[in-house]
Image (spheres, grey):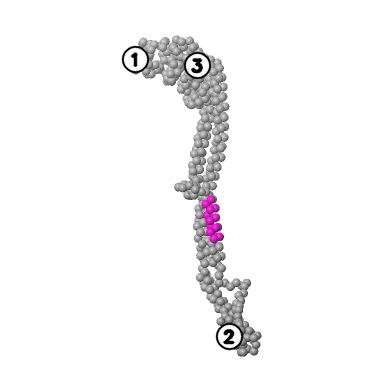
């Protein structure tokens, strides 16, 4: 018994978890914290593996690790202890946990890999295939972990793109012009800048037409002489004969026929006077027309400036409106193009996500297959599957 004492110096008290010391005189383990003592038989092989299994199932991984370390000091090739060390490193209570892909991918491989490598190196030849297959299972678990990481990253990018699209969509509404809704009281509506430009240009065109009609109306001088027509003034002279005397009407004095040699001479004289009177009246009317024509021209000589102002001022305002609306349209186009780029990117992300999900499904299927192969290689399936009830019932199972 004294020959194995150097290999039995480190044990944990199952009562309080304190470090046990060896009393070589009494040949017992003693706990300096709670005073409990254990004989050496307490730590014999069957009992060690039994306590390690109970500690493992209870999640007391430190105690389980100490027991498996103690077992491997005595028997470095012990299959149960080697596998137990792997379970402890993975914080797993049973190998059945590794049948679940999500549990497998959450395994701390940085702690498990060294234990698997040590198990492959120390295991008996007939047990190496089991640990090699277990190493393959963990490798597939790493692949599954990476696939899930890619899926999560891809989905996160998709959600971020969705939020970005929503943000840009809201921003693309800002360049719209808020106007009062003519159909709904106390309501507003968003009008695209293109519609604002079209409306403004339409109003300007109508205004220019109205100004054109106005200009045409005031440009026509009502006193101007029409070159295509000739005005002739005819005075009709009425006359009558009374007591041998011809009397001319309409203001003409009567002429005594005795003063004329004949009636024709009289009529010729009357016609001459009529022509002279008509000529004077025509000259007077033409003079008045010319006076009024010149007066109208002077009064309306600056009308073209007014008409030009009526066109240029509204035109300048419309030009400013169009300038700012074009800037808004440009901004809307930029945002729409950005949305299209993000949507294209999002489509690629969705395709990648689908590919990753397909890979993950394939890996899950592979995990199930490899686990079945691993279970078929288990040299002691009864140890893994049987419930732990007591020390005496388990002792016969640890003979490996």
Visible residue check, residue 259: yes
Q: Which mark is residue 384?
A: 3
Which sits in the foreground, 69 or 210? 210
The x, y position of residue 318, in whole percent, is: 51, 56
* Above or below, comparing residue 182 to residue 344 in the picture: below
**Label 2 secondary element:** loop
Which sits in the foreground, 381 or 102? 102
Residue found 55% across the figure and 63% down from its top: 213
**Secondary structure mainly formed by the magenta segment:** helix
Tell me the residue that label 2 is attached to: 254
Sequence order check, earlier mark of 3 and 1: 1
Residue found 41% across the figure and 12% down from its top: 42
* Above or below, comparing residue 242 to residue 383 in the picture: below
Tell me the residue that label 1 is attached to: 35
Q: CA distance from mark 3 to mark 1?
A: 34 Å
Visible residue check, residue 52: no
């Amino acid at each position: 018994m004294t020959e194995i004492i150097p290999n039995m110096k480190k044990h944990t008290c199952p009562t309080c978890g304190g470090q046990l010391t060896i009393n070589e005189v009494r040949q017992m383990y003693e706990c300096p914290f709670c005073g409990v003592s254990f004989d050496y038989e307490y730590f014999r092989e069957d009992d060690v593996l039994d306590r390690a299994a109970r500690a493992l199932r209870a999640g007391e991984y430190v105690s389980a690790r100490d027991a498996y370390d103690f077992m491997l000091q005595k028997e470095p090739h012990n299959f149960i202890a080697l596998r137990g060390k792997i379970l402890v490193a993975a914080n797993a209570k049973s190998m059945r946990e590794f049948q679940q892909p999500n549990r497998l991918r959450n395994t701390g491989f940085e702690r498990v890999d060294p234990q698997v490598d040590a198990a492959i190196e120390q295991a008996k030849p007939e047990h190496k295939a089991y640990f090699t297959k277990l190493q393959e299972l963990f490798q597939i678990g790493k692949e599954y972990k990476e696939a899930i990481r890619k899926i999560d990253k891809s989905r996160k990018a998709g959600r971020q793109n969705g939020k970005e699209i929503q943000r840009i969509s809201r921003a693309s509404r800002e360049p719209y012009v808020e106007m009062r809704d003519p159909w709904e009281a106390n309501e507003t509506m968003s009008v695209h800048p293109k519609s604002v430009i079209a409306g403004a240009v339409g109003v300007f065109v109508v205004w220019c037409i109205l100004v054109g009609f106005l200009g045409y109306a005031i440009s026509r001088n009502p006193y101007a002489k029409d070159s295509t027509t000739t005005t002739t003034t005819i005075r009709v002279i009425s006359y009558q004969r009374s007591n041998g005397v011809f009397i001319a009407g309409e203001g003409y004095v009567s002429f005594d026929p005795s003063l004329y040699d004949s009636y024709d001479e009289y009529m010729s004289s009357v016609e001459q006077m009529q022509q002279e009177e008509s000529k004077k009246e025509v000259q007077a009317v033409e003079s008045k027309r010319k006076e009024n024509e010149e007066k109208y021209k002077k009064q309306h000589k600056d009308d073209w400036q007014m008409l030009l102002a009526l066109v240029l001022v509204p035109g300048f305002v419309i030009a400013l409106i169009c300038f700012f609306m074009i800037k808004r349209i440009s901004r809307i186009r930029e945002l729409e193009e950005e949305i299209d780029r993000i949507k294209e990117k999002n489509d690629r992300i969705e395709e990648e996500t689908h590919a990753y999900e397909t890979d993950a499904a394939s890996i899950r299927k592979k995990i199930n297959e490899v686990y079945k192969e691993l279970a078929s290689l288990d040299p002691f399936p009864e140890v893994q599957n049987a419930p732990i009830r007591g020390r005496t019932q388990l002792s016969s199972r640890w003979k490996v």
